[in-house]
Image (spheres, grey):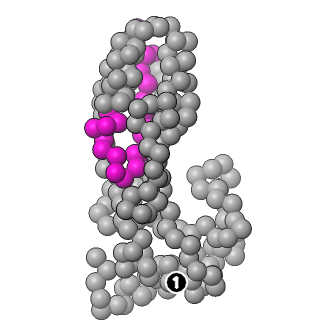
Amino acid sequence: MLRAAGGDPSVMGILEMLEEAFGDFYGRNLSIYKEDEYFNGEWVHRNVFSPDMVRTDGSELRITVDVRFAYGTEPEEIVACLQELAASRGGRVENVSVMPAVFVSKDRPFLKVFSEAYDRHWGIPYSGSIAMGGSYAKTMPDIVSWGPIFPGEEDSCHEPNESMSIESIEKCFLIYTEAIQKILFSDRSFK
């Protein structure tokens, strides 16, 4: 959370600072922008910044910033960047809560089983894994969220009117069932 008081102390001045700093949610206007979206040759996305709540508290303005940081970025880098931004307005950073970024290689055996099931039920090779930040999967070790977006379908994940065709839901059911059965009934370890 950023607490701002100073610089241009007006609400408008603070809002202008927010627009300047976070107008691009990848942080291009912050010193923490990452050009590279890959870690060890696998796509992990970029850092994403979102000031989610702005409220007054007496004579202070409190700004809650949600940061989804990509694997390979250290939380300390982001906190230092936000501290510098807050200090530029006479403010400070408080109440930092961090869940570490997670990286699970697409080459892990259990993910290969899902890719193979996709290939069989969709009839075309799985094009590879794409990492998405912010999943609750990161709260448990060695857990990932896995769900395909099929060719020709729009990615409406977490968007208004999120949807998937009935055909795709049925294919997902077959893919998940096959992959989970193969993992459960296998003699090999998928750790």
Magenta-colored stretch includes residue 66: yes
* Rendering quarter of residue 94: top left
Q: Residue at x 50, y 78 (%)?
A: 115
Q: Secondary structure at mark 1?
A: helix
User: Where is residue 43 shown, x and y percent of the image?
Assistant: 46, 60
Dot 1 amino acid type:
Ala
Q: Position of residue 79 (x, y in %)?
A: 32, 33
Q: Quadrant of residue 154?
A: bottom right
With 83 as the anchor, is 175 left or right in this view? right
**Residue 157 pos. (x, y %):** 59, 56
Q: Position of residue 60 (x, y in %)?
A: 40, 12
Q: Quadrant of residue 140?
A: bottom left
Q: Is residue 21 left or right of residue 95?
A: right
Q: In the depicted view, which residue is nearer to us: 82 or 52? A: 82
Q: Inspect the magenta stretch and tell me whether residue 148 lies in it.
A: no
Residue at x-position 34% and y-position 51%: 72
Query: Which quarter shows the C terminus?
Result: bottom left
Residue marked by disc 1: 117
Q: Which residues are magenta?
A: 56-79
Q: Is residue 57 visible?
A: no
Q: How many marks?
A: 1
Whether residue 164 is visible: yes
